[in-house]
Image (tube, rainbow, N blue to C red):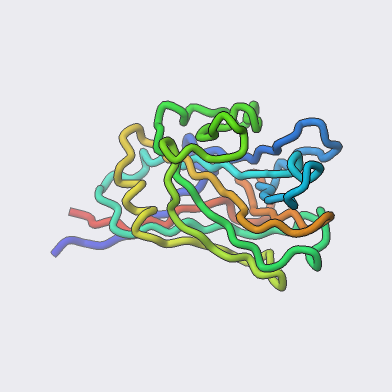
Amino acid sequence: MAEQKTIQISTAIGEGRDGYVMASEQTEEKLSRIALLVKEPPDFSWGTPFRRRGYMHFDLSFVSERPVHSAKLQLQGVPTEIGFLSLMPDASFAVYGLTDESLEDWDEATLSWQSSPGMLADDVTLDPTKTRLLGKFVVPQSDPTRMFSIATPELAEFLNQDTNGGATLILVSETAGIKDCYVHGFASRRHPDASPPTLRLGLTKP
């Protein structure tokens, strides 16, 4: 009988990396190095520059056995002290996989909104020919700093289709609050205490 095993891969090991992008580089906000900040701003012209999305890359060279039969992405919510939680309802987040592997050589040190992979020419919409929805989760207003996760067949299938030894995931907020609403944060690989973005993979060992 084949042996089942589980391995963990985070953005902190191997060729892993993570970062976030902001629609405007002209704001006074200092880019966080310890958190991936994610926000869908109110639908007003002044809100657009504050849109933020997270990018995560996982080194799949550590996966010696295929196929992956189950996969879970874990993200640790962390406080950001940006905006007011009372102005942000329960928020839905979507995780997309970057399917165009030619775009996976992004550098977290130079990643910007304009250079972020998988974007259409409108600089807002993710390109459906280069990205794929893998799952969603909800961050409640009452508890934005716990562990969040998705575990879907789509995530496992996406990882099994990898051909270059790496996988990039994109984190997008789907819920807009009102002016001065909270900016959600998730621990990056540079956080001093919280766990970095992590994949838990169920494998079948021959």
Residue drawn at x 26%, y 62% as measured from the top left: 4
Q: Position of residue 2 (x, y in %)?
A: 17, 61
Asked where in the image residue 53 lies, by quadrant, the reply is top right
From the viewer's side, name the closer residue of 88 and 33: 88
**Going by the image, does 31 lie left or right of 59?**
right
Q: Farthest residue in the front direction?
A: 44
Quarter of the figure with the N terminus? bottom left
Residue drawn at x 60%, y 44% as measured from the top left: 54
**Going by the image, does 166 lie left or right of 22?**
left
From the viewer's side, name the closer residue of 28 and 120: 120
Q: Farthest residue in the bottom direction?
A: 142
Q: Farthest residue in the left direction?
A: 1
| Total numbered labels | 0
Residue drawn at x 65%, y 32% as measured from the top left: 113
**Going by the image, does 30 lie left or right of 72?**
right
Residue drawn at x 51%, y 60% as measured from the top left: 136
* Relative vertical location of residue 80 with respect to residue 124 in this rendering, above or below: below
Q: Position of residue 85 (x, y in %)?
A: 78, 64
Q: Position of residue 148 (x, y in %)?
A: 56, 63
Q: Farthest residue in the right direction?
A: 28
**Going by the image, does 184 lie left or right of 136?**
right
Q: Position of residue 20 (x, y in %)?
A: 64, 40
From the viewer's side, name the closer residue of 11 and 23: 23
